[in-house]
Structures are given as C-alpha cells and as structure tokens.
Image (cartoon, rainbow, N blue to C red):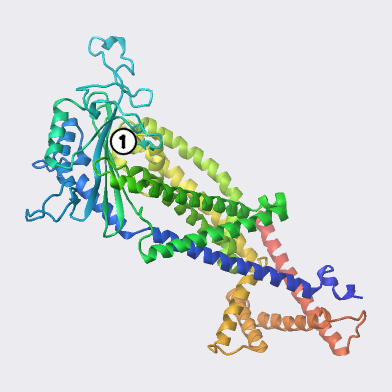
Amino acid sequence: MAEASRWHLGGTPKHKLHYREDIEIRTTLQELLLYSIFLINLCILTFGMVNPHMYYLNKVMSSLFLDTSVAGEERTNFKSIRSITDFWKFMEGPFLDGLYWDSWYNNEKLYDLKNSSRIYYENILLGLPRVRQLKVRNGTCKVYSFFWSLMDECYDKYTSKNEDMADFGLKQDTEWKYSSPGMNSPWHWGFVGVYQNGGYIFTLSKSKSETLNKFINLRMNSWITRGTRVIFIDFSVYNANVNLFCIIRLVAEFPATGGILTSWQFYSVKLLRYVSFYDYFIASCEIIFCIFIIVFTIQEIKKLKEFKFAYFKSIWNWLELLLLVLCFLTVFFSSYSNMQIYRMLGQLLRDTEKYSDFYFLAYWHIYYNNIIAITIFFAWIKIFKFISFNKTMSQLSSTLSRCIKDIIGFAIMFFIIFFAYAQLGFLVFGSQVDDFSTFQNAIFTQFRIVLGDFNFAGIQQANRILGPIYFITFVFFVFFVLLNMFLAIINDTYSEVKADYSIGRRPDFQLGKMIKKSYNNALEKLKLKKPETDEDKERMENKDLAEKARREGFDEKEIQSAEQMKKWKERLEKKYYSTEIQDDYQTVTQQEFRDLFLYAVELEKELHYVSLKLNRVMRKVSALQY
C-alpha cells in the first residue's frame, strides 16, 4: 500500500528525502561556520606576526649602509662597488660611519652607551660585527697550453671542492687562518655560487679607530687576493621601541670573470614574541590553531575510514590533506624556531665581546613566516569548497572544472612554443642582455613581454636581424594567437555553463536558501522585519520568475499561460503526490478531471509550438547547407 504513494521518487518517501537534504545542508553549514572561525583565527595569527615597523626598520638600515656614498665620491656606495679599491673605500668610509654612533648630532656625547653603539640613536648594536671571506685554490682550473707563457695561475669558481683552507698572508690572527664551518650553519645562495659557512674570519672592535686601523692593515697586507670569491659582512641590531631585531648581511661576490657583484639581506624579525598583552592574545590564537588541527585531523581520519580509496577521488580531500600537512609543518617550524631562540638568545646577548650569530635564528624565523604564508593561501583557496550557495561562484567553479582538460591540452602546446622561444632568446641574447643572461631569466622575461614590460632596444642592439624577428613572432604567436585561444576556451565553456543554468540544469542552491531563511528569521525575531506569509512568498516568487521571463524575451501572453500551468501543476501535485496519502485508490471528481484535461491540452499546445520552432530551425539549417 505504501508503494503506491511513493512511486514517483523511486521508492524513497518524499519526506525522508527532504529530511536527508536538510541534514546534509545543516552539516555543510556547520562545517562552513567552523571553518570560518578557523580562517579568522589563522588570519589574526598571521597578521599578528607582521609589524609595519619591519618595513621601516629595513628601509632605514638599507638606506644607511647601501645608499650612503664615499666622501668626495657621490657615485661610490655599496651598490656601485665594482673593484677591490671601491670595496676598501666603502669599508673605511660609509660602513664605519654607519656602524659607530658615539656622539649626538651637536657633537655632544651620547647618554650611557654601556660600551655599545646606537645606530640612529635607537638601534643597539648586538655583539661585534663580523667579516669573513671564502677563497678557492690556485690550479682549480686548466690554462690552455698556448697561454702558459702568459699566465700560470688559474682560480675557478667557488665550490666546496675548490675551497682554499690553507693559511696565507701574515698567518697570525684568525683573518689569516681558516675556520671550519659550524654544523648547523645555513648555506648562502648568491648570484654566482652557493657558499658555506666558515672561512677566514675577523671580528671588528667596539672602537671605531681600532677598526679603521684593522681595515688599513688588511688592505696593506692584501687580505683580498685573486682567490677570493666572496666576502660576508654580518651584524645585528635591536630596537627596543618596536621590539624588533634587524639581522643584516652585506655580500660582495668576486666572480671568476673579475669585478664585484654586491647583494644584501635585511631581516627584521620579532624574536621576543611574547612581551605585550597583544602578544599573549596571539599566543591564545596559536593554541586555538592547534586545537583546530586536531579536530580537522580526526575528521579526515573518519572520512578516510568511511570512504577508503574513494576518499582520494575528490580534489577537495587532497586539498584538505595538503592543508593539514602545511599546518603540521607550521607548528613544527614555530616550535623549532622558539626552541632555538630560547636556547641561544640569552647566550648571544651575554657574549658582547664576540660576534652574535643571530642570522641562524632569523633564518628559521623566515622559514616559519614563509610556511605560514603558504598555509593561509591554501586556507583561503579551500573556501571554494563551500561556494555552492551562490549561483555566480558556482558558475565559475563549473566553468573551470569543465574546461580543465582543454586547458591542460592547451598548456602543453603553449609551453612547447614558450620554452622554444625562451631557449632561442637565451642563446641569441644571453651574452648581451641582462634579461636573457640565464635560461630562467629568459623565461620570466617572456612573461613580462606578455604583460607589456619589455626592452626592445636591448634586444635589437644585441642582434639587429634576429632581435626584431624574435620579438615580432613571439608577440604574434604567443600574445595574439595562443592567449586568445585560451580566452576562447574559457569563454566557450562559460557560455555552455550559462546555457545549462538557464534551462534548469544547475545545482540546487539549498545552502544559500537556508542561509537566507536563517537571516530572515533572525530579523523577524529581532522585530526588524515583518513575518512573511505563504501568500507573500508565493507572490514574490512568481514576480521574480515573471521578471526573469521578460528579460529572456517572452511576451505577456506566454508568461500568463506559464503561470496558469504552474498553478494547475501545483494543485495536482498537492492532490496526488502528497506523502500523507495512505489509500491505494482515490476517487477523482469532475472538477479535478477538468483541470487535468485543461493541463494536458496546454501541454499539447506547448509541445506543438516547440515542434514548429524546431522544424523552422531545421529548414534554415538545411537552406544554409545548400
């Protein structure tokens, strides 16, 4: 008996189906609310780590040590160093002046310095600055036999195998003797090599005059030789006003080609993380973050046990796993960084007569910042999992999911042509144009050309024939052809998705309806809005449908006919599709039979109208073919 009342739903009662949908929607809504709290907490945590003073501290320090020129030579500063002579001028001039602040601007002595320098009167110099160099041995490369009479020395580029570890020069102090690198010291990635720690090291004095005499002594005794490949200048300062450490590294590389390449690193980090009340609030957010990680991990384990291998078929599950891995890495980097800070910071601050290696602490702190930045990026991406409550966002996700195969095929063709042009540019212009000096530079330069940032004059000057040919053909094939093909793929797929949505082949935005319903109920309970009756809801819904039909080109007669058919359909569904029917047989009155007959007649008219339209379209198609 019950089967007769639920045949239209394939054996599932309608009230049970609605109940399941409500449970699923409520679960999704709860997940969305929980994840929103997690995302807000993560945003507070990440933004609480960043201080606007970090940028200003880096800017102040960089302008002091990079842009200050040698007295009497306005063009000679650290950025413009090109020779050993320029290097020593910088070390004995702007570097010493920027490092030692022992008097006020009116030449009065500063307040109690406690035997330490105060850069810009606010930033205390921690410990002693350190200068170290790495060298390579003679004979690490071969001289062609034709040039043996001209030179018998050859110094290759820096590698750990080519490194010179022998004492040289005066062979007295540490600057003339090799010091082995530490076990935990990070390597440095420069322009022309990757350099390890250690080397020939000397620390500066707290006296400016002593340090100057030391520099003069090193210069006179040729501390920098032909085998020198890199010099590091390391020191750190602390600003108590903003509770920030600034770890500074100035690098001068001596490539095998000759000359000097300068680079620098300024890291403003907050090593003392828990000082103010706001810092302790951030600490509470970190604890909440760990709790969320545990909750999400338990949820994913339950899903994995329930769905097993089918769990890995969803891209959202892969994103969940990636996000969890990043969260665990964030906790690991944060814990390790804090452990190293508490283990080493006190000792570094006590040893004021030695070099304080804060670079190691800053190194791990920067890694922590990078990993949490990547984590919050993917955390925001996960928001797309909950976009089904919005039509526009659902159209976007449907478009991307439908055209992904076409985009992959297009990407293969695009990058074949793109890399072919990159290799052409590298081989033709690599020795003349800085933008093409390496294959990686050539790739990024071509992306810049696509965005309109290019140096055509440099390309043309490097090769007057191949330069213009390369540029014109690259712009034509990549910009005008391939990029427009990409846009055509997206546009065509979007048109298909929009057409499917217009004829009703679209997901049911029940979550959006529930959010809207909850919002209206809250307003009604707060007496900010009058409660809506069923008649008001039906009238508003009919009005919206009529407006949509007018926008799509239907006339008033067709709209009225559709509204009449809808009323008949709802009346019949209410009568015969109700889940409350328990009898096998229900009598049909004469009025109900008349309504059903009129409904069938209207359906026949609509089908006949659609058939005429299809025949007209087919005749037009046939005429176009002939």
Compared across the picture, whether 33 is left or right of 440 comes to right
Residue 580 locus on image (x, y percent): 83, 81
Residue at 59% of width from left, 75% of height from top? 515
Residue at 38% of width from left, 42% of height from top? 445
Question: Measured along the vertical axis of the image, is residue 410 above or below residue 505?
Answer: above
Residue at 82% of width from left, 78% of height from top? 577
Residue 520 locus on image (x, y percent): 58, 82
Question: Measured along the vertical axis of the image, is residue 557 above or below residue 485?
Answer: below
Q: Nearer the viewer, residue 41 or 308?
A: 41
Residue 89 locus on image (x, y percent): 14, 36
Q: Nearer the viewer, residue 128 or 42?
A: 128
Which quadrant is home to the C terminus? bottom right
Residue bearing the label numbered 1:
433
Residue 549 locus on image (x, y percent): 62, 76
Compared across the picture, whether 408 is left or right of 247 comes to right
Where residue 320 sits, quadrant-wise, is: bottom right
Residue 449 showing in the rendered view: no
Question: Measured along the vertical axis of the image, is residue 342 above or below residue 468?
Answer: below
Residue 218 showing in the rendered view: yes
Compared across the picture, whether 141 is left or right of 31 comes to left
Asked which secondary structure carries label 1, the reply is loop
Q: Amino acid at mark 1?
A: Val
